[in-house]
Amino acid sequence: YEFARRQFGQGDKVLDIACGDGYGCRILSGNVGEVLGIDINETLIAANCQQNTQTNVRYAVDNAFALSLGDGAVTGATAMELIEHLPVDQVDTFVREVRRVVAPGGAFICSTPQNSHGEIPVVPWHVREYSFAELQAILEKHFTRVKILSSKSGGPLSESQTGQKMVALCQ
C-alpha cells in the first residue's frame, strides 16, 4: 500500500478492492482525494463504516466481478493480495472489470505472491499462485502498460523477475 500511495495524488479517486478491515484505505487516504473501499463481506464493511474517521474514505459492499461503478469512475484502483484467492476461471473477468472502471490514464496496482514452481500454491488457502510471466500475461490482456516489481524476504521492490512477492503497476 505504501508503493500504491506514492503512485496517486490529491486529485485521484482510488478504489481499494477487497479492502478487508480498511487498513489499505487508511494508508491511501493520506495522499489521495477520495478512497472507496469495497468488499463482499457485509460485516467488515459495516464495521468499517462505523469506525471510519477519515472524511475522504467511504466503504461499500460490492462484487469485484461486477462492480457497481460506472465506466471510468475512478482514476486508480488497488487489489492487494487478492488475485491468488480468485477462481482461476474468474481472474480475466476481474481484471477486465477493473479496467472498465479505471479512467483512461489511470492506474491499477495489485500485489500477489510469486510462485515459479508450478500451479500448486505454496499457501494452501490460495486458489492459484502465479509466476511473473503468468501475471504479466493476465494483466497485459487489459492494460497497455504493465510494470511488475518483485521483492525477496520483505526487502525493497526491484525490477527483478524473481522474488516472493510481486507488485504490478498497470496503465
Image (spheres, grey):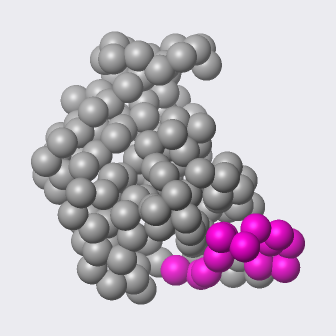
The span picked out in magenta is 49-62
* Frontmost residue, 123 versus 99: 99
Tell me the quarter of the image containing the N terminus: top right
Left or right: 42 as drawn, with respect to 89:
right
Quarter holding residue 156: top right
Residue at 58 percent across and 14 percent down: it is: 155
Q: In the rendering, at what x and y percent does residue 135 appear?
A: 28, 38
Q: Does residue 141 lie above or below 41 as drawn?
A: above
* Frontmost residue, 74 versus 80: 74
Left or right: 167 as drawn, with respect to 92:
right
Q: Does residue 33 lie above or below 2 as drawn?
A: below
Residue at 71 percent across and 56 percent down: it is: 26
Q: How many marks?
A: 0
Quarter holding residue 56: bottom right
Q: In the rendering, at what x and y percent does residue 140 appear?
A: 16, 45
Q: Is residue 114 visible?
A: no
Left or right: 116 as drawn, with respect to 43:
left
Q: In the rendering, at what x and y percent does residue 7 appear?
A: 44, 43
Q: Is residue 158 visible?
A: yes
Left or right: 107 as drawn, with respect to 124:
left
Q: Does residue 13 lie above or below 25 as drawn?
A: below
| Magenta stretch contains residue 73 | no
* Frontmost residue, 54 versus 83: 54
Q: In the rendering, at what x and y percent does residue 4 appear?
A: 50, 43
| Magenta stretch contains residue 61 | yes
Most distant residue in the right direction? 51
Residue at 41 percent across and 47 percent down: it is: 109
Quarter holding residue 117: top left
Q: Does residue 62 lie above or below 1 as drawn?
A: below
* Frontmost residue, 29 versus 120: 29
